[in-house]
């Protein structure tokens, strides 16, 4: 399309600020010109942060609207029926300057192009987030997509609308809001059932310009991971003092173990605990989990199951109890050889399904990744958008 030369009185760029009520990017037409020959009157309504940009044409229609930030990133949008108005799909972000270029056509077919710009002030509070699992990682079949927010999220529905999960096989799943063990707001996306092996998962968090209620997001986030091609489930029976490794539905090995001591604070948790991380050789100190001075030692082949301190690990000092009695301080202990073998065969995201009559309760959703311990219906109800379904 050929662009006509812009009259001199149109060339002055209109500088808009966040507090402007609006701007007209074209001077008033001379009264002597017939109405159909007058250029369309273009108005750019600069938004406050967190709202879309709106462009309107009076006495004509919009042909092209381009809104871009200082880095050249374009703010896409849609023209309404009749082509007299345009609204950006994305919200304007705080601390960002935008240029607006509009080509409009008058009723008589005359095309003019106008340019303007506006800037929004910096956010007084910025919210950031931490994503798990890590980008481009491979995880077990129980690993949820988890987001922990630095600042409070009181506008949960607004935030959740900007979180898009895509899977390679159309996996059904839902977001659920909970409190992380750290006390921070957290949103997890878990499938209805364990992931199918080999599933590829992508998150597009288009949060730039979204107000969480406790701070503004000033960037987008994108991550992705792959589910392992092997489905591993570790089944721990504390009543029988044994651990079974099941791979693709087949029992691979059975290991004698000793769980938490019955009758007090040293009991183990029950339910499904997702393997959070393989931490290797670490120092374990009972005072960090509220058990006084019961122990302070280096422990090999440590596999974290909860934030509250439950691990599966080597416990040679408890050898006489393996397969016979639960006498640990809450962890799942086994021999050095069995712990080394298990450590080598599992990966983060594998579920540990723990049963037993004498435990201190079920792993809570925020204590590691305990979302599997609530029903699918209960989990969906934790979505901020549950009422809109």
Image: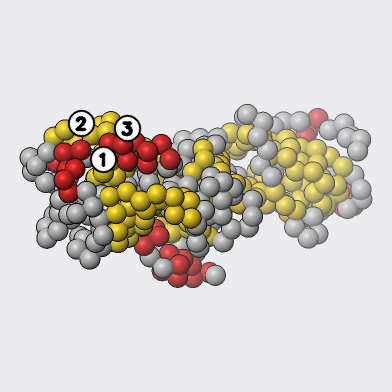
Relative depth, front residue between 240 and 220: 240
Q: Which mark is residue 298?
A: 2
| Residue denoted by label 1 | 335
- Which residue lies at the image location 16% right of the left edge and 33% below the top edge? 297
Q: Which mark is residue 280?
A: 3
Q: Is residue 342 left or right of residue 376?
A: left
Crowd around label 3: few <14 · some 14–19 · many ≥20 (10 Å): some
Tell whether label 3 touches label 2 (CB within 8 Å): no
Q: Which mark is residue 235?
A: none
Q: Secondary structure at mark 3?
A: strand
- Which residue lies at the image location 38% right of the left edge and 46% below the top edge? 275
- In whole angstroms, how far apart are the C-alphas of marks 2 and 1? 15 Å
- Which residue lies at the image location 27% right of the left edge and 33% below the top edge? 300
User: Which marked residue is nearer to the observer: mark 3 or mark 1?
Assistant: 1
Q: Quadrant of the C terminus?
A: bottom right
- Which residue lies at the image location 83% right of the left edge and 52% below the top edge? 60
């Amino acid at each position: 399309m050929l662009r006509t030369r812009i009259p001199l009185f149109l060339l002055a760029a209109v500088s808009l600020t966040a507090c402007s009520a609006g701007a007209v990017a074209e001077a008033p037409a001379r009264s002597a010109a017939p109405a159909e020959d007058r250029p369309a009157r273009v108005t750019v309504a600069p938004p406050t942060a967190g709202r879309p940009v709106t462009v309107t044409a009076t006495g004509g229609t919009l042909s092209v609207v381009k809104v871009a930030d200082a880095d050249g990133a374009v703010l896409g949008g849609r023209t309404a029926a009749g082509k007299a108005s345009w609204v950006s799909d994305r919200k304007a972000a705080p601390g960002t300057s935008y240029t607006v270029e509009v080509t409009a056509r008058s009723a008589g077919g005359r095309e003019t192009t106008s340019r303007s710009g506006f800037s929004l002030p910096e956010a007084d509070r910025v919210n950031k987030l931490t994503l798990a699992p890590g980008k481009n990682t491979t995880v077990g079949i129980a690993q949820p997509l988890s987001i922990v927010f630095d600042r409070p999220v009181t506008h949960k529905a607004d935030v959740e609308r900007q979180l898009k999960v895509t899977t390679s096989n159309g996996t059904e799943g839902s977001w659920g809001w909970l409190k992380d063990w750290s006390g921070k707001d957290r949103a997890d996306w878990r499938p209805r059932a364990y992931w199918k092996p080999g599933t590829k998962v992508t998150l597009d968090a288009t949060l730039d310009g979204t107000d969480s209620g406790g701070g503004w997001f000033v960037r987008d986030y994108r991550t992705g991971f792959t589910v392992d091609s092997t489905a591993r489930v570790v089944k721990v029976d504390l009543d029988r003092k044994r651990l079974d490794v099941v791979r693709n539905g087949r029992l691979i090995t059975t290991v004698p173990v000793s769980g938490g001591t019955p009758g007090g604070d040293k009991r183990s948790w029950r339910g499904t605990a997702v393997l959070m991380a393989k931490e290797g050789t670490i120092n374990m100190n009972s005072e960090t989990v509220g058990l006084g001075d019961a122990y302070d030692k280096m422990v090999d082949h440590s596999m974290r199951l909860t934030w509250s301190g439950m691990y599966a690990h080597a416990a040679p000092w408890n050898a006489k109890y393996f397969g016979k009695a639960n006498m640990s301080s809450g962890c799942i202990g086994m021999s050095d050889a069995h712990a080394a073998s298990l450590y080598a065969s599992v990966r983060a995201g594998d579920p540990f399904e723990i049963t037993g009559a004498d435990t201190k309760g079920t792993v809570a959703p925020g204590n590691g990744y305990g979302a599997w311990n609530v029903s699918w219906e209960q989990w969906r109800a934790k979505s901020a958008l549950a009422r809109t379904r």
